[in-house]
Structures are given as C-alpha cells and as structure tokens.
C-alpha cells in the first residue's frame, strides 16, 4: 500500500479521501532535519504553505511520486526539482473561486446600499434613513478586469442580478464570454462604460499598479472600484485622490499594497471606502475544498493517471526531445509575442506545424504556444501539464494541422490568430539552433525573439527609421538590431527593434506621436 506523509493541517474531508487510498501519517511536528530523515519512506507528500519542499527534500524523497499542495500557490515547492525527478505536483487552484466571487458581490451590494456605513450609524445611536438612499444594481454596468476563474464566477452572479457585464481579458475568447453573457471590450471601453469596475487579475509585472491616475481618470464620473484581487494592482494614493476629488463615488477593498496596512492608513479610514481584511477565500467551504481537491489529485497521480490540477510536466519523450527542444522555446516565445502584440479580442488560434515539425509528436509544440500565450497573464505557474486546462477554462480555441512542406525552411511553425480586427499571421523557425521569427503580423522580418523589443506599425516613407532612432537615442536606449518589413513601397510597414533596455512609456508615447506612426508597442520576451 502507498504511504502518504501529511506535514500540515488539512481539512478532515481531504484526509478521508487520502485514507481511502493509502496509509496516511499526519506529522505536524517535523522540523527540516526530521522531514529529511523520514521523507524517503513515502510515496506522496502533502503540505500547505509552511513546509518548504526544497530540492534537498525532494532528493531525499527517493520514493516520492506526487507532492500535494492544499491551496493555490506552489511558491514553497521547488517544482523544477520535482519535475526533473518525474514527481507530479498537484494543487487546488479552483477551491477559492466561489468564496472570492461571493465576497465581491457582497462588496458590490455594500457599496450600492452603504451597508457598513449604515450599520455603524445605527450602532452609534442614530436613525438616518434619509442619509442612506442607495442605488439598485439591476441594469447597471459592471466591468470585470480579468475574466479567469474568479472573474467568471462574478460574471454569472452579476448577470443573475440583471446587471450588464463587460470584461477585458487578453486571452479569453469571444465564445467563452458570450457563453457567460459577457460583452468583451477593450480596457479603455470598459473603464469608460462601467458603473462599477471590479478587478480579478493576477499580480504580475504587467498588472502592477494597473489602476493608476490615468486609468482612474478614464473611469466614469461617479463610478466605483472593487478590488479583491491583489493590493499591488491598484495605486492606492491615486485611488484616494480620485475619490476625494469627487471623480469616483467610492471603492471596496479586500486587499492592500501592504498587508496588514498600517493602523492609521488613510485607505482604511476613508468614509467612502469599504474595507475588509483579505477575507476573500475565508469560507469553510473553500478550506474544505482546498483539502479534497488536492487529495483527489494526489490519489489520481498515485494511481498513475493524470490528475486534473497538475502543475508540472514530468514526462517528455526522450526520442523526440532533440528535434523538438528548440521549437518548444520558439513556440513559447511566439505565444508571448502574440499575447503582447495583438490587442483585439481573439476568436481562435490556428497552428501549422510544417517540415521536420510535421513528423514529430505535435502536442508539446501546441502546449508550448498555449503556455506562452498564457504565462504573462496567469496567477498560477503555467506548464505544459496545466496549460490545456487553463486554455479550456478560458475557452481558447487552438487548432493544429501538419504539412510536410515548409517553404525554404527545415521546419516552420505558423500561428494564425483570428481576431475581431482580422487575421494576424506569424511564422517562426529554427536557424543554427536558435529560434527566429521570420514573419510578424504578416510582415516578413527576421529576428531572435528574446529580451526587450519595440514594434512600430507605420507608413513606409523616408526618415521614419531615423526619427524613431533619434527618440530612442535621446532617451539613452541602445538599439542592438533593426528589421523592417513592408507590404509595398510607401505602404504599410513594420519596424522591429531589439533593444538593450526596455523603452519607457514616455518614449513609447513620443514614438506614437510621430507623424506616420500608426501604432507602437513595447514587447518583453
Ligand atoms: P485566473 O488566473 O483564473 O484569472 C486571471 C485572469 O486575468 C486571466 O484570465 C488572465 O488572462 C487575466 N488577465 C491577466 N492580465 C490581465 C490584464 N492586464 N488585464 C485584464 N485581464 C488580465 O486567476 P483567479 O483565480 O481568477 O484569481 C484572480 C485574482 O484573485 C488573483 O490576483 C488572485 O491572486 C486573487 N485572489 C484573491 C483572493 C482573496 O482572498 N481576495 C483569493 C484568491 C485569489
């Protein structure tokens, strides 16, 4: 019988699932040395967030086949070390969704009816019925920034309250949004049209201080902001200023840039801001399901099957590795590039694996493209094991076909993005062992997709390249390479610059302001 070591307290229901399948030892008293000493006797290790499952622990766990994490993040587990050893890491990423979504709805109604303020008023001996005249959520527009697991649960509940729901999410498909009764729009349109904006994005580089002075100013006058995602997504000073100036009517927060916030922080004492102490996931049900979801994963993995929520990819066929390996990094970089270059809602992605790629197992390449498309915009670690699941949840449509003909290349990966503003075509290949993008959004170019890049869409005319170069030079940004592709002389053209350091927002704004520049994007790969 398999043996499972549990080093932290998990829900009784979860333990029960484990006990049905294996012999379970719950040892809450282990320090690092004791864990190292006994882990070698177990087939599975189950932790929450306190146990540090380092490479050393994993190496000592010579029998380990699975590590279970009762909860979402896997920061305390060295997933790479586990992957190298072929150990499956499972977690419970869906367990919080409903809890956070329900809190969000609570905060929404709290804002509409000033429930916390009315409660405090009555407790202080007043009876202020006229002060607390609220508004109905029915018929109002809710804008969801992020339509992932939690955002979609909020959408369903808001629709049930007869709200009109808008969302901005760079990877969710129109089909998925339609299914949820949600109108997919650009970020700008969402801010301008929503009566209430609610944030459900991960805290990653691109979402840090996403809601800043400029974005708050784009919101409707009298609108409200809800944040139950991560504190760092909102510039709190800018939020206070927007409320004090009367531009926003109020806000509701579960999360803060610093947790706990200082006792005298203005953000928690403002009369128009409802605050709760990061309780989004704190329900009995969420805690139970973190235990059971993880335990089911552990049992499935012990039986040799693929669990629903596996974080890593323990299996790579060694024969295919030498051909595939350079294409996997190409595929992933192409996904990341496309994610940052295409800004319209996407209907689907069609892949063509051509030339030598047509002869190998195509699945890893498809997964690597999906991984690249998702990884900049997901909270959890995206790996080839969980990428298909996350993609399915977002309703991403990815089709693939093979073709032995690869033009003049040995192998060619073609990604065709079908978006609301038309088709965008990308070609990638491997030259001398290095990935190259040879067609970007239709334009023939040739560059290595890595580091900081700048893309312009412009009118081909004399002096264009010089003017962009002058602005970058003026900002002390060094250009390491430059590639121009055009459709015809003096027609639409694309310039790709590889940079030694990223172009700042100011530099980008100056370039966008140049006559003849239609669009400019900074891309980090
Ligand atoms: P998820 O990964 O399922 O969904 C996040 C979505 O945001 C993805 O679909 C992604 O494409 C989208 N996204 C990424 N960058 C974006 C951007 N710039 N603009 C618009 N959309 C963008 O994550 P989830 O499980 O739904 O979690 C959402 C947030 O809630 C995370 O920040 C998570 O940490 C937080 N959370 C909070 C609590 C709490 O107690 N308050 C509990 C659990 C999770």
Image (cartoon, helix red, strand yellow):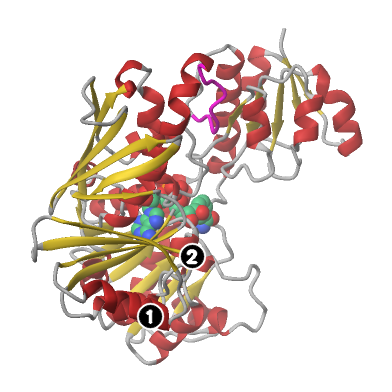
Quadrant housing the N terminus: top right
Q: Tell whether circle 2 marks a residue whose Cβ is less than 8 angstroms from ligand 1.
A: no
Q: Quadrant of residue 523?
A: bottom left
- Magenta: main secondary structure: loop
Mark 2–mark 1 Cα distance, whole angstroms, equals 17 Å
Q: Which mark is residue 500?
A: 2
306 to 416, vertically: above or below: above
Q: Answer yes or no: is residue 505 visible.
A: yes
Determine contact: label 2, label 1, CB under 8 Å.
Answer: no
Q: Position of residue 183 (x, y in %)?
A: 19, 55
249 to 339, vertically: above or below: below
In this view, the residue farthest toward the bottom is 245
* Left or right of residue 13: residue 51: right
Residue stretch rendered in magenta on the structure:
309-317
Mark closest to the chain's N terminus, 2 or 1:
2
* Left or right of residue 503: residue 412: left
Q: Which mark is residue 387?
A: none
Q: Is residue 222 magenta?
A: no
Q: Position of residue 260 (x, y in %)?
A: 65, 69
Q: Position of residue 518 (x, y in %)?
A: 17, 70
**Crowding at label 1, few (<14), some or many (≥20) Cα neighbours within 10 Å?**
few
Image point (57%, 37%), residue name: 290
Image point (49%, 35%), residue name: 383
* Number of on-image labels: 2
Q: Secondary structure at mark 2?
A: loop
**Crowding at label 2, few (<14), some or many (≥20) Cα neighbours within 10 Å?**
some
- 19 and 354: which one is in front? 354
* Left or right of residue 171: residue 18: right
Q: Secondary structure at mark 1?
A: helix
Q: Answer yes or no: is residue 223 visible.
A: no
Q: Which mark is residue 506?
A: 1
Between circles 2 and 1, the one closer to the viewer is: 2
């Amino acid at each position: 019988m398999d043996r499972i070591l549990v080093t932290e307290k998990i829900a009784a229901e979860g333990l029960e699932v484990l006990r049905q399948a294996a012999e379970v030892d719950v040892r809450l008293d282990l320090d690092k040395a004791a864990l190292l000493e006994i882990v070698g006797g177990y087939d599975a290790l189950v932790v929450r967030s306190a146990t540090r499952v380092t490479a050393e622990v994993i190496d000592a766990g010579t029998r380990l086949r699975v590590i279970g994490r009762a909860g979402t993040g896997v920061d305390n587990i060295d997933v790479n070390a586990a992957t190298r050893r072929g150990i499956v890491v499972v977690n419970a990423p869906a367990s919080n969704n409903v809890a956070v979504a329900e809190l969000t709805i609570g905060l929404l109604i709290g804002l509409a009816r000033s429930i916390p303020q009315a409660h405090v008023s009555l407790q202080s001996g007043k009876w202020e019925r006229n002060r607390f005249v609220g508004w109905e959520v029915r018929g109002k527009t809710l804008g969801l920034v992020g339509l992932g697991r939690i955002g979609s649960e909020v959408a369903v509940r808001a629709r049930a309250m007869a709200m009109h729901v808008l969302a901005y999410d760079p990877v969710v498909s129109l089909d998925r949004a339609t299914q949820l009764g949600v109108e997919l729009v650009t970020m700008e349109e969402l801010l301008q049209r929503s009566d209430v904006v609610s944030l459900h994005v991960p805290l990653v580089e691109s979402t840090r201080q996403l809601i800043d002075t400029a974005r708050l100013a784009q919101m409707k006058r009298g609108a409200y902001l809800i944040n139950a995602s991560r504190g760092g997504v909102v510039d709190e000073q800018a939020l206070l200023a927007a409320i004090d100036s009367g531009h926003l009517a109020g806000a509701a927060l579960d999360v803060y840039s610093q947790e706990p916030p200082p006792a005298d922080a203005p953000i928690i004492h403002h009369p128009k801001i409802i605050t709760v102490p990061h309780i989004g996931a704190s329900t009995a049900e969420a805690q139970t399901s973190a235990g059971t979801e993880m335990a089911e994963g552990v049992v499935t993995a012990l039986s040799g099957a693929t669990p629903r929520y596996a974080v890593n990819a323990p299996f790579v066929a060694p024969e295919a590795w030498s051909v595939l390996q350079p294409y996997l990094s190409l595929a992933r970089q192409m996904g990341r590039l496309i994610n940052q270059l295409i800004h319209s809602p996407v209907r689907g992605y069609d892949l063509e694996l051509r030339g030598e790629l047509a002869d190998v197992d195509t699945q890893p390449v498809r997964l690597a493209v999906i991984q690249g498309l998702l990884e900049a915009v997901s909270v959890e670690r995206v790996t080839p094991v969980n990428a298909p699941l996350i993609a399915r949840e977002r309703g991403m449509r990815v089709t693939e076909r093979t073709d032995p003909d690869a033009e003049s290349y040995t192998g060619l990966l073609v990604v065709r993005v079908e978006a609301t503003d038309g088709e965008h075509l990308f070609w990638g290949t491997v030259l001398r062992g290095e990935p190259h993008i040879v067609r970007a959004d239709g334009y023939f170019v040739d560059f290595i997709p890595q580091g900081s890049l700048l893309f312009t869409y412009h009118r081909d005319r004399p002096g264009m390249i010089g003017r962009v170069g002058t602005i970058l030079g003026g900002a002390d940004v060094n250009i390491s390479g430059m590639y121009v592709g055009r459709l015809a002389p003096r027609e639409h053209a694309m310039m790709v610059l590889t940079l030694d350091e990223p172009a700042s927002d100011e530099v980008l704004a100056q370039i966008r302001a140049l006559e003849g520049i239609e669009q400019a994007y900074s891309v980090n790969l």
